[in-house]
Amino acid sequence: MPARKTPGGYAPYLDGLYALNEGRWPDAARSFAQALEAQGDDPTFMLALGVAQVLAEQFPAGHKDLDRAQRPGLGGREAQLWISAAEAMSGSLIDPNHSLGGPGGQKDRPVVVSIPGHVAEGGSR
């Protein structure tokens, strides 16, 4: 695929979007990481990287980048929803309060993730 002429990290970001669309999760994660290197801490690029890492089952890295995406002011619920998806897919909670049944959970059973109502309904905190 020929290189796209776009400013900063947008060329690798677009490559990452194409890779996501084609189900090439690790390729998408690499492209989004390149976009972040070129562009700096862009919360949209961090979110995209976190999503690609979760889909590639790179859960610790995905958790980290999804959490990072929320800090510089990325509002909305996308990162929170993907954190919940990552927790459910990996069986590992970032926040013990996300466990259905509370922080203690049941150690002998799979993790059941509770998505906060304001996230599921589309509101913000």
Image: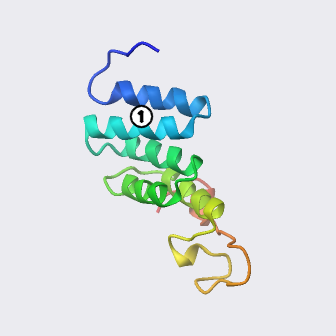
Q: Please tell me which residue is depicted at 50% across the width and 70% down the height of the picture.
A: 94
Quarter of the figure with residue 10: top left
The residue singled out by tag 1 in the image is 31
List x then y, in percent, for residue 21: 59, 30
Image side of residue 12 versus residue 90, left or right: left
Q: Amino acid at mark 1?
A: Ser
Q: Nearer the viewer, residue 94 or 116?
A: 94
List x then y, in percent, for residue 122: 58, 53
The mark tally for this picture is 1
Q: Please tell me which residue is depicted at 62% across the width and 34% down the height of the picture.
A: 23
Image side of residue 33 versus residue 40, left or right: right
List x then y, in percent, for residue 105: 65, 83
List x then y, in percent, for residue 14: 44, 26
Badge 1 crowding class, 10 Å Cα cut-off, few under 14, some 14 to 19, many 20 or more, is many
Q: Above or below — where is 52 with respect to 121?
A: above
Residue farthest to the bottom, as pictured = 104
Residue farthest to the top, as pictured = 2
Check the image and tell me how it is coloured. rainbow
| Element type where label 1 sits in the image | helix
Q: Please tell me which residue is depicted at 32% across the width and 15% down the height of the picture.
A: 5
Q: Nearer the viewer, residue 103 or 62?
A: 62
Image side of residue 58 versus residue 85, left or right: left
Residue farthest to the right, as pictured = 109
Q: Nearer the viewer, residue 12 or 48?
A: 12
Quarter of the figure with residue 15: top left
Q: Please tell me which residue is depicted at 47% across the width and 15% down the height of the picture.
A: 1
